Image: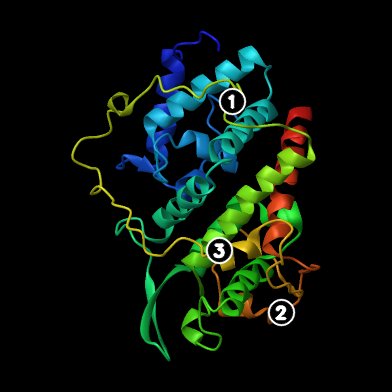
Amino acid sequence: MGNTQSIAPHVKESIKEEFLQLNPLGKYLHFNDIIRAKPFEAYPIDLTHIAILFCLDSDKDGRFELHDFYNLALFTAIVEKEIGPSVSNVEAVCTLHLIKETILNRDIFIEWFTKLVLHVASPTHGQFPTITSFGSDGPQKISVIPIATMLIVYHALHILDRTGVDFRHFFSVLQQTGKQLDVIPKDDPQFDRSIAVLVFKMFAQSIINGFTELARRTGLVVDSSTILPAFPTVYRPEDDNPPEDDNPPEEQYVETSHAIPSSISAASTPGAASSPVLSFSIPIIERGEEVSDSSIRGESSVAGVETGGFSLPSLSLHLALSGLERGEKIDDD
């Protein structure tokens, strides 16, 4: 569909300049780099939109190369030509691509989203940190994601804005889910400032379930035969030309936890028994604020946010629906 074949040289140069400003010495941008970025001048869209990130990452390794951004600029031009000049159109088409590519295998999204966060939690080692738990079965190493990384995820997904769920509530639900499903020990303080990778994968599953449920509720029929404007692959790694001799060592993703067991997977599927539901009031944690012990314990209720019942399945649909509403608001502006 469409015959747009390339982007203008000045647009390409602008993208390259902005890419190098975010990471002057690296071949890749990571999730936390994307969060720091302002919308590129070439396409003023929200780069933290999860469906856009999914399409942007051409090889689904959780990292973003310069040629990925060239292809996104080209894709934006294609959508503008075929559908109309609207930010929400790009978000909508990317959302449909996400649903189409994962409808038969949601593990594609779960593993990709986990890799996305891996490169924040451990940008050079290629595997998540582990905590050794000593139980009746002997010592066991459990892969975890630190609280600082989860704060980045929380802000990137705009969870407070879209759902009213504060960070302590969000983090505690993930922790309590792990404890109630015996993924982590119930009384081991080592895990107070991290969540298990397996629980994060449940969270990722709840997100993709939310997108699928969004399609169902809005009457969209999306399957492998659905025709969409194709995300281009015109630009390839050889078009990047990163600075020589300054790239970090190639990272290797090491799978550190098993797939979600079916008994656990059901807990994050719409219509199934939900994860633990908690409710409390805590201070709002702004982007860039240090994550202190008092913030996590909620010792102060000054400027607190009261939240109601919250679970992984309820969050997933909130994120999907509010993402659609957010796109409409951008369009109106």
x, y percentage for residue 224? Answer: 57, 30
Mark with earlier residue (2, 3)? 3
Q: Amino acid at mark 1?
A: Ser
Which one is in front in this view, the residue at disc 2 or the one at disc 3?
3
Q: Amino acid at mark 3?
A: Ser
Q: Which residue occupies 69% across, 70% down?
A: 169
Which one is in front in this view, the residue at disc 1 or the one at disc 2?
1
x, y percentage for residue 103? Answer: 59, 40
Helix, strand, or loop for circle 2?
A: loop
Residue 182 shown left or right of residue 127 in the figure = right
Q: Label 2: which residue?
A: 300
Spatial separation of the CA atoms under disc 1 and disc 2: 53 Å
Mark with earlier residue (3, 1)? 1
Relative to the observer, which residue lies in front, 242 or 272?
A: 272
Mark with earlier residue (1, 2)? 1
Residue 309 shown left or right of residue 166 in the figure = right
Relative to the observer, which residue lies in front, 96 or 56?
A: 96
Helix, strand, or loop for circle 1?
A: loop
Of the numbered discs in the image, which one, if any, rests on residue 262?
3
Within the image, what quadrant is residue 94 found in? top right
| Label 2: few (<14), some (14–19) or many (≥20) C-alpha neighbours in 10 Å | few
Residue at the extreme bottom: 136
- Residue 297, compared with residue 95, is above or below; it is below
Of the numbered discs in the image, which one, if any, rests on residue 225?
1
- Residue 93, compared with residue 22, is above or below; it is above
- Residue 231, compared with residue 296, is above or below; it is above
Q: Amino acid at mark 2?
A: Ser
Helix, strand, or loop for circle 3?
A: helix
Q: Which residue occupies 39% across, 78% down?
A: 131
